[in-house]
């Protein structure tokens, strides 16, 4: 509709007819005026910049670049087959790490991850060290750093898994007081672990030139997994709370899959976080898709380590 159709003159008998008529005439003239402003978009912009300052256009934040490994080494060994049935009973494999067998120059998974920490990770690690030294003192922190509790915990786990017994069948007093809470914490998880294939066994990736010692390879709820046992004073209910542990598990699995000492392949992982106070442990499962993603991350960290050397 045109402006003329929308503007109606006031009725003549209205008590305000004279005033309204004048206003109406002024409004019609304003709307219907053909006079064109002398200002252009350029002059208006210049005027706005003079009054308000220059316009600063917001820039679209750049998406973080997705890094990919230069060479995507396979996670699985195609020459070996995946086990779908329960393996035959037998003692778990244990290949002891011997640095004298040409392995002295082969870096470990732990060393590679430590030397490729991000600046943020280094900051929080140093902050944690300072806090622990303040609480325990220099000597106490040195003893803590030797992971005595962790070694005792792993030893107790090995004893239970090798004996095919459950924690509930054991007398807690058989074990050092330092680990009784941790063992109580993982007691329910131990009920779901069967068919242990390896315990504290060395795995090595010949092609990528790294090695590590896997805590355990067993079936958890029927799924063959590389299992990593962790202890913590703080709850870690989410996988993200475990920091680089999933990368570590993927690295171990990839090495095991390429190691001729192991005649099977492992696609899945499990990180178990046990607590000193005996509260139920958190079990973080890594399915095959997640393991592949963490394998790619491991390859990037390995490339970074190699470039540093």
Image (spheres, grey):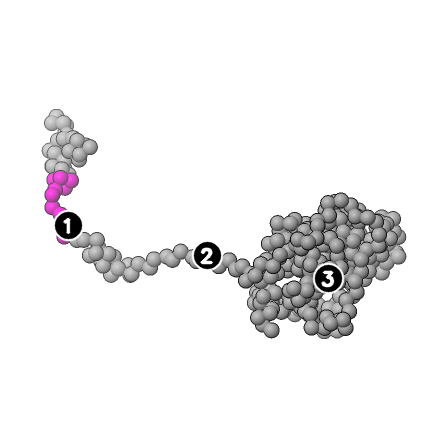
Residue drawn 51% across the image and 58% down it = 66
Range drawn in magenta: 29-38
- Name which of mark 2 and mark 1 comes first in the sequence: 1
Residue where numbered disc 3 is placed: 203
Residue drawn 75% across the image and 69% down it = 146
**Where is residue 165 drawn, in percent x and y?**
86, 50
Mark closer to the observer (2, 3): 3
Residue where numbered disc 2 is placed: 63
User: Looking at the image, can residue 74 be seen?
Assistant: yes
Crowd tier of the residue under label 1, counting other residues whose Cα lies within 10 Å: few below 14, some 14–19, many 20 or above = few
Crowd tier of the residue under label 3, counting other residues whose Cα lies within 10 Å: few below 14, some 14–19, many 20 or above = many
Mark closer to the observer (3, 1): 3
**Where is residue 261 drawn, in percent x and y?**
76, 59
**Where is residue 234 drawn, in percent x and y?**
69, 57
**Which residue is nearer to you in this view: 28 or 129?**
129
- Mark 2 → mark 1, Cα distance in angstroms: 44 Å
Residue where numbered disc 1 is placed: 37
User: Looking at the image, can residue 188 be seen?
Assistant: no
**Which residue is nearer to you in this view: 173 or 303?**
303
Q: Report helix, strand or loop for mark 3.
A: strand
Is mark 3 in CB contact (under 8 Å) with mark 1? no
User: Position of 224 compared to 247: left or right?
Assistant: right
| 305 falls in the magenta region | no
**Which residue is nearer to you in this view: 47 or 212?**
212
Q: Report helix, strand or loop for mark 1.
A: loop
Residue drawn 81% across the image and 55% down it = 92
- Mark 2 → mark 3, Cα distance in angstroms: 38 Å
- Name which of mark 2 and mark 3 comes first in the sequence: 2
Crowd tier of the residue under label 2, counting other residues whose Cα lies within 10 Å: few below 14, some 14–19, many 20 or above = few
């Amino acid at each position: 509709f045109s402006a003329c159709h929308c503007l109606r003159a006031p009725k003549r008998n209205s008590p305000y007819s004279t005033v309204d008529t004048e206003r109406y005439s002024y409004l019609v003239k304003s709307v219907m005026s053909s006079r064109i402003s002398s200002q252009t978009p350029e002059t208006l912009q210049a005027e706005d910049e003079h009054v308000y300052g220059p316009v600063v256009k917001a820039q679209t934040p750049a998406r973080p670049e997705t890094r990919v490994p230069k060479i995507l080494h396979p996670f699985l060994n195609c020459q070996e087959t995946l086990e779908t049935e329960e393996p035959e009973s037998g003692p778990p494999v244990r290949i002891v790490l011997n640095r004298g067998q040409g392995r002295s120059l082969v870096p470990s998974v732990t060393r590679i991850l430590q030397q490729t920490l991000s600046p943020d990770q280094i900051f929080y690690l140093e902050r944690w060290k300072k806090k622990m030294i303040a609480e325990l003192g220099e000597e106490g922190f040195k003893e803590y750093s030797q992971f005595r509790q962790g070694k005792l915990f792993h030893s107790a786990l090995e004893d239970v898994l090798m004996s095919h017994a459950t924690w509930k069948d054991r007398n807690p007093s058989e074990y050092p007081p330092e680990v009784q809470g941790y063992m109580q914490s993982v007691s329910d998880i131990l009920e779901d672990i069967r068919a242990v294939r390896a315990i504290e066994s060395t795995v090595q990736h010949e092609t990528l030139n790294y090695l590590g010692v896997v805590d355990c390879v067993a079936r958890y709820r029927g799924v063959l997994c590389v299992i990593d046992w962790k202890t913590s004073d703080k709850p870690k209910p989410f996988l993200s709370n475990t920091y680089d542990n999933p990368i570590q598990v993927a690295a171990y699995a990839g090495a095991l899959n390429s190691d001729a000492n192991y005649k099977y392949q492992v696609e899945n992982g499990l990180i178990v976080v046990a607590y000193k106070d005996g509260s139920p442990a958190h079990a973080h499962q890594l399915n095959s898709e997640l393991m592949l993603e963490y394998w790619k991350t491991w390859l990037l960290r390995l490339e970074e380590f190699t470039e540093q050397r």
